[in-house]
Amino acid sequence: MAEKKRLLQILDLIKMLPRNNCKECGLPTCMAFATHVLREGTKPELCPYWQPEDLAFVKQSMKDQGEDSAYPDHLFSARKFVQGKINDYDFASVANRIGVQLEISDEGEHFLLVNLLEQLYRVGKKEVEAVDGAEHDLWDHVLLYNYIAENGGRELTGEWVPMESLPGSLAKRKAFVKGCEDKIATAYTGKPEKLRASLKILKADFPDLDSNAEVAAVFYPLPKIPFQMLFWDADLEDGFPAQIKVLFDSTVLDYLDIESLVFLGEKCAERLLDLI
Ligand code: SF4
């Protein structure tokens, strides 16, 4: 997946908005409004509560960004496509299958509360919000919607398999190694204890896995998608670099398509690098 650029962020806007979710802009929350301004071309003036200097700053920044969109068109299409797929889903019955909580608003609208790498997202059929205000973007939306769209599958088997044994993984394996395993291994070279501490923040367990890895952890980037992560630190004498290997439950493709799984690996790396 292409590298994304860091432009004006949703949180930048949220900090300037009153955060009272009054809905006057036509969107249910200030977070949704900020997301629409940055991602969907909604006019910032639709909120009447900006400080004039903040509104001027946002408009100028967006103008400066010009056509330099952070997102390719196909990403918008992908989100639309996958939103279309879940449009008829009964969230109440999906929730259990994918291990998430159902929330029903006062208006009777259904949302799924999805824990992605220990950050909670409220996913509706039209909107995604971070419950704790964490930064999120269109890539995250597509990932969360794809997780819901797969609609769960078999119970987890506890049988661990490498990516290369998954059907259709041939073309994706390289991207996973580069975007996830190698990135984490490089960042944590010489720091096995630090890796252990970061994984604890992601609520990892460290079971006895009968492995010679220096760190052997199991954690859940998504509720039904455990990663078994093994880390061997660099051997400077023999010249071996540090290595990470991720294994999946054999049911993983019941819960996420292979492309989204690669992206989930990239998200894991991003999060673990942030935690150093
Ligand atoms: S009108 Fe402004 S304050 Fe009200 S919900 Fe929309 S963005 Fe938030």
Image (cartoon, grey):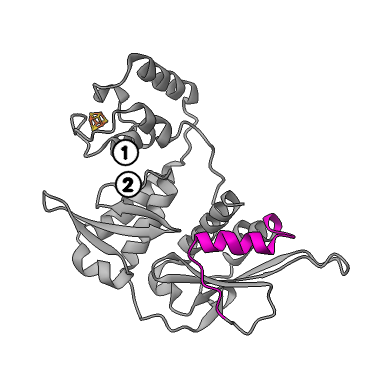
Q: Sequence order check: which comes first, mark 2 or mark 1?
A: 1
Left or right position of 202 against 132: right
Looking at the rendered structure, the secondary structure element under dot 1 is helix
- Residue at image mark 1: 31
Quarter-wise, where is residue 191 in the image? bottom right
How far is mark 2 from mark 1, CA to CA?
7 Å
Give the vertical position of 177 relative to 250 (above or below): above
Furthest residue in direction right, as rendered: 237
Assess whether mark 1 and mark 2 are in contact (beta carbons under 8 angstroms): yes
Of residues 131 and 61, the one nearer the viewer is 131
Residue 199 covered by magenta stretch: yes
Q: Nearer the viewer, residue 43 or 72?
A: 43
Q: Where residue 23 appears, x then y in whole percent?
A: 19, 34
**Magenta residue check for 105:** no
For the point 27% across and 55% down, which residue is it?
84
Q: Which quarter of the frame holds ligand 1?
A: top left
Residue 89 visible: no
In the picture of the structure, the residue carrying the numbered disc 2 is: 129
Q: Amino acid at mark 1?
A: Met
